[in-house]
């Protein structure tokens, strides 16, 4: 993460935003877990007016797409000229990265269970043996249906997932495991 030399005014403004910030509406659906998540529009709706009224703006710039990797830089800027930027690189859909980065930089709480759609848009290297082992263990721990998981990612078996699909499957299963542990 990079920032201007001083961020005191930016931090003060962001603290004011966060003290008033609500949750983003979970108005989009994930069919695999039959759950809802906050899409990019909902995240923006949750913070746009508060950011503006506190002299804050958000800029997002996609980077180059190289070797199956995409990057995104999100800059939180204050009217004083102070800024913080958060360059992120990963293999995912640009909208998915924008929503996640925006929510992270301003502190919006949201569900993050739709990233699997990003994997279908770009090409990603093959799943690793470690990812296969993790997914297999998590399926067992959560009592999930492997056929439904494969169908969700439109693959006949876990071993045919690409790395991004594997990362998303692991994340989804870990969330499911975490939810089950809370109940």
Image (cartoon, rainbow, N blue to C red):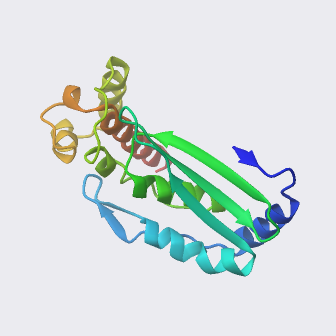
User: Residue 147 appears in which quarter of the rendering?
Assistant: top left
Q: 146 above or below 18?
A: above
Percent position of residue 48, x then y: 59, 76
Side of 6 where 145 appears, left or right: left
Q: Answer whether residue 61 is visible to the viewer in this image.
A: yes
User: Residue 96 appears in which quarter of the rendering?
Assistant: bottom left
Q: Answer whether residue 38 is visible to the viewer in this image.
A: no
Side of 56 where 118 appears, left or right: left
Side of 89 where 147 appears, left or right: left
Residue at x 68%, y 61% (from the top left corner) = 76
Q: 127 above or below 81?
A: above
Percent position of residue 116, x then y: 32, 47
Q: Quadrant of the N terminus?
A: top right
Residue at x 26%, y 40% (from the top left corner) = 144
Q: 15 above or below 152?
A: below
Percent position of residue 100, x then y: 51, 55
Q: Who is closer to the viewer here, 13 or 177?
A: 13
Number of callouts in the render?
Answer: 0
Q: Who is closer to the viewer here, 120 or 6?
A: 6
Percent position of residue 70, x then y: 43, 42
Q: Who is closer to the viewer here, 131 or 138?
A: 131
Residue at x 75%, y 75% (from the top left corner) = 55
User: Residue 57 appears in which quarter of the rendering?
Assistant: bottom right
């Amino acid at each position: 993460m990079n920032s201007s030399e001083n961020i005191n005014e930016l931090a003060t403004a962001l603290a004011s935003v966060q003290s008033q910030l609500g949750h983003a509406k979970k108005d989009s659906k994930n069919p695999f877990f039959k759950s809802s998540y906050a899409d990019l529009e909902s995240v923006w709706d949750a913070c746009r007016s508060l950011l503006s009224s506190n002299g804050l703006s958000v800029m997002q710039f996609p980077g180059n797409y190289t070797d199956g990797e995409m990057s995104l830089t999100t800059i939180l800027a204050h009217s004083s000229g102070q800024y913080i930027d958060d360059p992120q690189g990963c293999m995912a859909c640009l909208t998915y990265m924008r929503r996640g980065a925006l929510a992270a930089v301003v502190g919006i709480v949201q569900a993050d269970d739709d990233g699997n759609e990003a994997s279908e848009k770009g090409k990603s290297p093959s799943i690793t043996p470690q990812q296969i082992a993790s997914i297999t263990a998590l399926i067992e721990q959560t009592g999930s249906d492997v056929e439904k998981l494969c169908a969700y990612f439109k693959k006949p078996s876990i071993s045919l997932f690409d790395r991004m699909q594997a990362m998303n499957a692991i994340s989804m299963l870990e969330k499911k495991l975490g939810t089950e542990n809370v109940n």
